[in-house]
Amino acid sequence: LAENALAALHDEAYDRAFDRRDLTAQGMIFIGGRKAQSLDGDWNFCVDLLDTGLRQKWFAMQPGDPADRIEPWDYDPHMGETVPVPSNWQMLQDRWYFFEGGSWYTRPLDIEPDPDGRLFLRIGAASYDCKVFLNGEYLGNHLGASTPFFVELTDHVREGRNWLMLFVDNRRRPDRLPMQNTDWFNYGGIYREVSLYRTPRTVIRDLFVTLAPGRYDLIRAEIEVEGATEAHLRIDGLVDRTIPLTDGRAVIEIPAEPHLWSTDDPHLYDVELTAGPDRVTDRVGFRQIERRGTEILLNGSPIWLRGIAVHEDDEKLGKLTNHADLTRRFDHAKALNSNFMRLAHYPHHEDASRMADERGILIWAEIPVYWAIDFANPATQADARNQLAELVRRDRNRASVVIWSVGNENPDTDARLDFMSDLAALARRMDPTRLIAAACLINHNTLKIEDRLAEHLDIIGINEYYGWYDEDFDDLEKIGRNSDPDRPVVISETGADADITPQGPKTGLFSEAYQAEIYRKQIATLSKLDYVKGMSPWILYDFRTERRQGIFQRGWNRKGLIAADKTTRKQAFGILADFYARRAEGKA
Ligand code: GCB
C-alpha cells in the first residue's frame, strides 16, 4: 500500500481515474410521491486537504479492529469523528471555517435483498465535486454544488452491511461554476438531504406536465419510463388516460381546461402517473407566462415583477435550508408586498420553489454561470449544461418558476456568447413554457443597455448599482433614456450596503440612511421607465462572503434589507414595501 501510495503521488493519470463526470441529469429518476429512506444523520468524517484518501485508497479499507492491522492507517473511515448530514463543515468547527479541499463522509448501509427491485441513491447537493464509492467500488463523480444527483446501487449492493463513502471536494478552480472569484461563501460538504429510493424494475424517470405553449385548453405531458410500453396519467378531475410509450417515451397533448395558477390564486392539482408497478405523484399548477414586446404576461395579463433577490445563506446553518428558514423568507417577501423572488446565484433547495408554488410567488431560477468563468473550456460548458439540465428536470413542474436564467454579469466575448446562447437554447429545448433571462450588461461608454446575448433571451436582466459602485446617479437616467430595448428589462439587482451594528456609520456610505436614500432614488428613476417590467433588489438578507473584509463588512455583504439575524429590518425594507404596495394598486 505504501509503495502504491508513493507511486500514485507522482501519477496524474491516477487522479484522472476519478474524473469520470458520469453522474449527470441522465441518471435522474422522478421522486415525487416515492417513499424515501433517509440517510441523513451522523456520518464519519475526515478532512483530506492532500487527497491522501484517494491515493491511499481509503475507500477500499475494510472495517475491522485496529489492533489486528499489520500497518498503520492515517484515517479510519469506519470510526472516529462524525458530522451531521446535511451540513456545511464550515459551520461545525472553527478550524474548518476557511477549509477548502476534499473530505470523506462514510456510513454503513444495511440492505435487505429485493431481487425484483432497484435501488437509487439520491444526494440533494454536495459542494462541489462528489465521488461516490460503495464497498470500495468507485461508482462515479458529480460536478456542481447545488443540484441533485442519483447513483443506481442495484447491481453494486450486497445483502447486509455495505459501506457508502463520499469524497466531497469544494476547491475553487478556474474551470468551475463559479470560478475562484465570487461574492458568496464557498460552503463545502453534503448540505442537502441524502436518500435511498427503492423502485420496481420499471422506473418512471421523468414526468413534465404543463399547459401547451399559448393554450389554455390543452395540457402537455412529457413522460419517460424505463421498462414499460404504456403509462397512466391522472390529473384530478381533468385527465384520466392511458398513454402508449415508444421506447419508453411520450410527448402528448390532452384537451383539458384547468383552473389557472396565479399569484393571487395559486391553485394546484394532484397529478399521478403509474407505469406497471411504478407510481409517482406531484402537485402541479397550470399557467402561461409569455412576453409580448416589452410586456411580461401571466395568464395573458401584463404583470410587473415586485421582487427581491435571495441567497441560500444563514448565520448559523450556512447554506442549509429548512422549513422554518424558508417560511420566514416567504413571510418577508409577502411583507414586502412582493410577487417575485430571484433565487441567486445557483439552484436553491427544491422546497423553495415548492413553497413558492403554494404561496403564489413567481421565481427566477438560475445556474452559477457567474462573472468570467472559463467560457472557452468544453469541460466547463459540459458542467454548465448539466447543472442547467438537472435544475430544469428537478423544477419544471413548478408553476411558480417562470424564468430560467443562464448567467450573471458575464463579459461580452465571443466565447461567452457561444456558451450562453447554447445554454439558452438548451433551456428552451428542455422547457418551451418558460422565459429565458440572464443578468446582462450596460455599455458604460455609451451609457446604454447593450449586450449581444439579449437577442437570445426573453428578459434582459440588468444589475446596476448607481449611487453605490457607480457614483454618478444621473447616469442611470441617461441609460434609461438612451436605451430602447425590444424586450422587457428586469432590474435583477440594485442596492447598497448598510451596516446597522453598533460599529456601523450613521451617515454616508454603509449607513442605513444612505441605503434608504439609494432605494428612494432608484425607485423614483426606474418606475419612470416603461420597458422596466420588474425588479429584484439586492438582497433580502445580509450574507456571508469571503471577499468583503472592509471595516463595515467584516466577512459579510451588507446589502440586505434585513440584517444577518434575519429579523432586524433596515429602513430600506419599508421604502421598498411601500413602493410595491403602490405598484400593486396601480398607483406607482
Ligand atoms: C453583483 C453580483 C452579486 C454581488 C453584488 C454586490 O453585481 O451579481 O453577486 O453580491 O453585485 O453586492 O456587489
Image: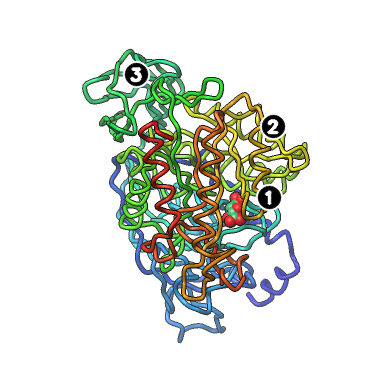
- Mark 1 or 2 closer to N-term? 1
Residue 580 rendering spot, x and y as whole percentages: 40, 41
Identify the residue under disc 2: 482
Disc 1 crowd, CA 10 A, few/some/many (<14, 14-19, 20+): few
Please state which amino acid type lies under the numbered disc 2.
Answer: Asn
Identify the residue under disc 1: 472
Identify the residue under disc 3: 243
Q: Of tags 2 and 3, which is closer to the observer?
A: 2
- In this rendering, is residue 44 above or below 380? below
* Image quarter in which the N terminus is found: bottom right
**Badges 1 and 3: C-beta atoms under 8 Å apart?**
no
Please state which amino acid type lies under the numbered disc 3.
Answer: Ile
Disc 3 crowd, CA 10 A, few/some/many (<14, 14-19, 20+): some
Q: Is mark 3 within 8 Å of ligand 1?
A: no
Give the camera-side residue of 319 and 337: 337
Disc 2 crowd, CA 10 A, few/some/many (<14, 14-19, 20+): few
| Horizontal side of residue 81 vs 273, given as left or right | right
Residue 437 rendering spot, x and y as whole percentages: 57, 35
* Image quarter in which the C terminus is found: top left
For the point 28% across and 31% down, which residue is it? 265
